[in-house]
Amino acid sequence: MAKNNGASDTGTAKSKSKLKAQNPEPQQNDQQEEAITANPTILLDENAETLETTEYGKFKFVHTNRPVSEKLVAQLVESIKNFGFIPGRQVLVNENFGILDGQHRFMACKKLKIAVPYSIVKGDSDAITMTLNSNQSPWKLADFIHSWAEQGRDDYRKLLKFEEKYKLGMSSSIDVFIRDSIKKSNDIKHGRPFPINEDAEQIAEFILQCSSVSFHKTQKFCRSIIVLFKKATPEQREHVKLNIITVPQCFKVEQYVTAYENILSGGARGKGRVQLQKKK
């Protein structure tokens, strides 16, 4: 692709496209959920232009978009060097030049100092951003959490701060931080509010104090500690922690809990055995 030395948009359209989100603009949580759940249909309109510019400063990153991956940018740089910019994959921006789709392509063009092909999109920017990105390459839960937090959702902001503080890994932090919520992944994707586990900080501290076992931040282990906090007394939890080094890495939460029962039972069987889980 040849370098564009012009300082402004080219006057000739290379191709024409436009997006329209058919869902109404969300105003509340339920409507916000509906906009994402419905997966708004994106229509191509031949009346819009695809332009190019080297004025990189006019582009802005949309706060609801996921963080830029430097690894992906580097891969795109090499791809564009070898094969050029793929036709029809222009950067999509709103009327304020906020990037709705193609932030990695934009960064790659900027690094290569070549013109950025773009089209202006009208519609609900937040719904379009999340839909386009999830269709292009699936968002991780962390991407959704960051997006909802950036939109001012206090519960999601607190979840991010929790993960930043304890660094359990996002999946384990979700399990520890959110109280008794089934379908957590689906709820998070749709921005539903969630109840915060009042013992989350205490559980996280307990997990970090189990660092004598290398697997202490794995999701199954963290889930087993949640069970321990629900079923065991503070004294029993402390006894398990003091003997955690004797616990092998397990494939299932139930296996970890059985190991805790063995520690607490001291070899006792039958009625003398401590039970933290229902037996099948």
Image (cartoon, grey):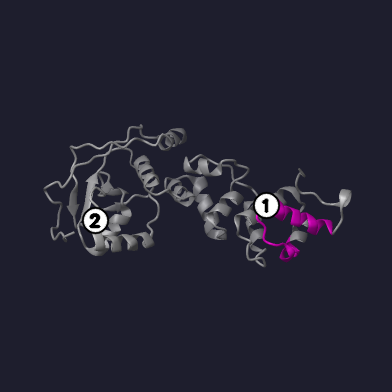
Above or below, 277 against 79 in this view is above
Residue 85 shows which numbered tag? Answer: 2
Percent across and percent down for residue 72 are 36, 59
In the displayed structure, 277 sits above or below 84; it is above
In the structure shown, which secondary structural element does the residue marked by tag 2 occupy? loop
Distance CA(mark 1)–CA(mark 2): 48 Å
Image side of residue 257 versus residue 11, left or right? right
**Which comes sooner in the sequence, label 1 or label 2?**
2
At label 2, the amino acid type is Phe
Q: Residue furthest left?
A: 11
Name the image quarter holding residue 48.
Answer: top left
Q: Which residue is mark 1?
A: 253
- The reply to whether the magenta stretch includes residue 249 is yes
Q: Is residue 211 above or below residue 250?
A: below
Residue 72 appears left or right of 206 = left
For the N terminus, the quadrant is: bottom left
Q: Secondary structure under badge 1?
A: helix
Q: Is residue 144 magenta?
A: no
Q: Nearer the viewer, residue 82 or 200?
A: 82
Provide residue 256's location: percent of width, then percent of height. Answer: 71, 55
> What amino acid is at disc 1?
Val
Residue depicted at x 15% and y 59%: 4
Most foreground residue, 47 or 62: 47
Which residues are drawn in magenta? Answer: 241-266
Report the front residue among 10 and 202: 10
Q: Quadrant of the C terminus?
A: top right
